[in-house]
Amino acid sequence: MLRALASLFVRLDRGSPTHLQQQICAGLRAAVATGVLAPGTRLPSTRSLAAELDVSRTTIVAALLQLVAEGYLVTRVRSGTFVADEPPDAAPPAAAPRPAPPAALRLSRRGEELARTAGALDSLRPRARAFALSRPALDAFPVREWSRLVARRAARITAGQLDYGHESPELRAAIAELVSSSRGMRVGADQVMLFPGTQPALEFAFAALLDPRDRALMEDPGYGGARTALASAGAALRFAPVDAEGIVVAGAGRARLAYVTPSCQFPLGVTMSLARRHALLAWADGADACIVEDDYDCEFRHAGAPLPALAGLDASGRTVYVNSFSRTLFPALRLGYLVAPGGVVDRLRAARATREEHLPSLTQLALADFIADGHFARHVRRMKVLYRARHQALVEAARATGRLRPRPVDAGMAAVVDIDVAAVAAAAAAARRGVEAAPLHHCYAGGRAPAEALVLGFGAVPPERIRAAVDKLAAAIEEVSARP
Amino acid sequence: MLRALASLFVRLDRGSPTHLQQQICAGLRAAVATGVLAPGTRLPSTRSLAAELDVSRTTIVAALLQLVAEGYLVTRVRSGTFVADEPPDAAPPAAAPRPAPPAALRLSRRGEELARTAGALDSLRPRARAFALSRPALDAFPVREWSRLVARRAARITAGQLDYGHESPELRAAIAELVSSSRGMRVGADQVMLFPGTQPALEFAFAALLDPRDRALMEDPGYGGARTALASAGAALRFAPVDAEGIVVAGAGRARLAYVTPSCQFPLGVTMSLARRHALLAWADGADACIVEDDYDCEFRHAGAPLPALAGLDASGRTVYVNSFSRTLFPALRLGYLVAPGGVVDRLRAARATREEHLPSLTQLALADFIADGHFARHVRRMKVLYRARHQALVEAARATGRLRPRPVDAGMAAVVDIDVAAVAAAAAAARRGVEAAPLHHCYAGGRAPAEALVLGFGAVPPERIRAAVDKLAAAIEEVSARP
């Protein structure tokens, strides 16, 4: 399989001034850094790599030796070359060190503080390690199809596309069609607003729908990105618990707005039942509130038929629907959207007029083609099967350890596991073994947060890697529980 | 000329579900909206358009009639079809109106206020009208070459490019080479940091170099974008006047940072003399201050050889250099950069680690190719000649009216003209005639702002359109001066 894949991440440009060896290194580094080539993967023989890439074996050997020296690969006597268990991060090796000229420039105290804390935070960011959250299966993305569509549009760039980018009517139409056919909504292209991702869409919606100190209701546990966006909008936050049917509406009190994740509750992964959806809409009618529906991962339900979106069930027109393509396709796409009831979309559009958000035409047009040509629907169908399989592999591996008890999950690419030690200590011990595990209580605002549970993202982890990573996590828990 | 150009802004996709007539309309609308097709331009005959685009004359006639109905084109009996003098804005015509379903959703008071003010502000944004500021000559951009380079890179998208985008080492190397060869700086690729434009680069630099309440020195008049970025960083602003040699350093007092535009002072367009550059560096040494050099339009000096950048003259390493490609190439590119002294760049990079700025790989790689293949240098050489000619045309047209007295300008794509009536009234009267003119005193912070001067951006206005637009501006001034 790897053999057929090699030319996917190493594309040689024989006209480039960059030496072929460096091009091969760059491609393999990127493949390792993004998890396309998983730790422990055995590389094909130098002979077959040379044949596939049509370069000399000398060049291949030189490239592999360089990557061994850099720590991306390891060689094992008589068995071949493998991706290192803990490869370095994505950054390419620095150019030959040169003595820095003397510089009088100093960072301010704030600058130095930023360098310390942001630098430290950055090293904690999820990389391509097992169980990092919110990382889709980039290894299964049809990159050749995508590349072909972008190249086709790129070959026809017009002068009009050189100006600041705006919403593409083609893409708005494709999205209106998509949610109408798959989410039970009936909307026109004029009701779709495009944003560079979910977060800007949420920030805009909260600013336009809430006044400072208005009450906003969130799920507890819930999504941190929405919480910070609500705080930025000056909202007075209220929290409602979540059970196996989703947000518990009874006793929620009045609020001006409710933010919910009905398809795949973040982070518990439960799907809001149909009854609970109707209860939430009735609550909103009673409170004269609006609903912001973050429908992320609606495509990836593990069992049963998809339920219609709240925005599709809502007869009063008080639901704003938000979704993005970062998880269904890939994060670098940076395209999200908001669908508003017809009666207010013109004023929402006016309210947005001076936000400086660039939406590149090329990406928008390629995405519109990708949807219109059926690639989107096909890819989502494949990914649904793939995430189901990865979830199953995680559940089985977790149970086999005896130390991780997976909770039931309805949808998505994350799973909650209960453990018997403090989640923070377990996460720290796991990180030292190269495995990410987010303590569940970080997602809670209230006081009932469970201190002994972890959230594991399995989307980007191929089944053959899941078992090894779960074993490392179990060893980390073992280590913590053995401490005096 | 137009004939050869037509296929540049109308590219027909015969495999697209969009009807050819609509594709032709979309291309022409965009060309008018971006100023590529200037108001008053005569279109070729329907016969020659049909031949060039290889479609039937019926299709061409139907497309032109539609654009006449939409207000983009006008027909004049026995002389042909022309771009309307005041075409509508860029937005495509709305889809067939559909009755909006009843919606309970309401905007908040803040949302309604945003809709009112942002909507109104948006209608004031510079469009493709004559003398809007900061608009380069998109009509002269080598869009075919650019399209070819983007398509070449797009055809080789790799899985590594699907993840969140980071700085391209190729582009950093190309920029290091560019500033080393043209700005008298000697820097390595590791000293270059990439940003999605000048504004984010300035915001970052000010936050990292200043503590709240630190003094920052700006030119007066000066660049509003830098002023708001300094204010966001909590700086205590100090202002120094500008004369024919640039910022007047003598008497500036102490400050922690100075922000300057040496190649093309904003908005006066004077170039800082070599003597003044050395004086500014000596001031910085004496005050132990740092300098943020915004080198925009360094490429477009109207007379004389280019002067080295402050960052090239600075022996102490206290200058941070900032520039972008929005004006040399096109605004939608959204790529700017910062070059820092070698000694601090690592900490600056660490301080930046958690800023969420997406830099699309495809655009970065195509730009690196564009520079490496010599297209950038060639285009800049052509644009230097073009802006000189447009400046000359503006000066001559302005003098001919007897109502506009152009001030000397050394560089760039804007000119200051003195008039005999209040600038605000003149700008309002000009806007009613479809001409933009920014009152100069809006760029002043101090009290000595001249109330009777305008700033005119001529970069995007072809010489044949300059005369007509200047005449409209003169008529607007005439109208104001005739008021009782």
Image (cartoon, coloured by chain):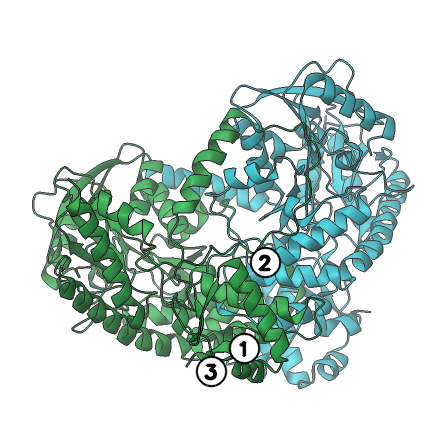
Chain colours: A green, B cyan
What type is the residue that disc 1 sits on? Answer: Arg
In this view, the residue in front, A153 or B44, is A153
Report whether A71 appears left or right of B382.
left
Asked if labels 2 and 1 touch by Cβ distance under 8 angstroms, the answer is no
Q: Residue at x 60, y 79 (%)?
A: A57
Please give the chain letter of the residue carrying mark 1. A
State the mark number for residue A4. Answer: 3
- Secondary structure of the residue carrying numbered label 2: loop
The residue that label 2 is drawn on is: B90
Q: Position of residue A5 (x, y in %)?
A: 47, 78
Q: CA distance from mark 1 to mark 2?
A: 29 Å
Ranked by sequence position, the earlier of labels 1 and 3 is 3
- Secondary structure of the residue carrying numbered label 3: helix
Q: Is residue B158 shown above or below A446?
A: below
Numbered disc in front, either 1 or 3: 3
Q: Quadrant of residue A305?
A: bottom left
Residue A385 visible, this orientation: yes
Q: Quadrant of residue B313?
A: top right
Q: Residue at x 28, y 73 (%)?
A: A384
Q: Position of residue B184 (x, y in %)?
A: 81, 42
Report whether B214 appears left or right of A44.
right
In this view, the residue in front, A291 or A329, is A329
Q: Position of residue B162 (x, y in %)?
A: 47, 64
| The residue positioned farthest toward the left in the image shown | A250
Numbered disc in front, either 1 or 2: 1
State the mark number for residue A148. Answer: 1
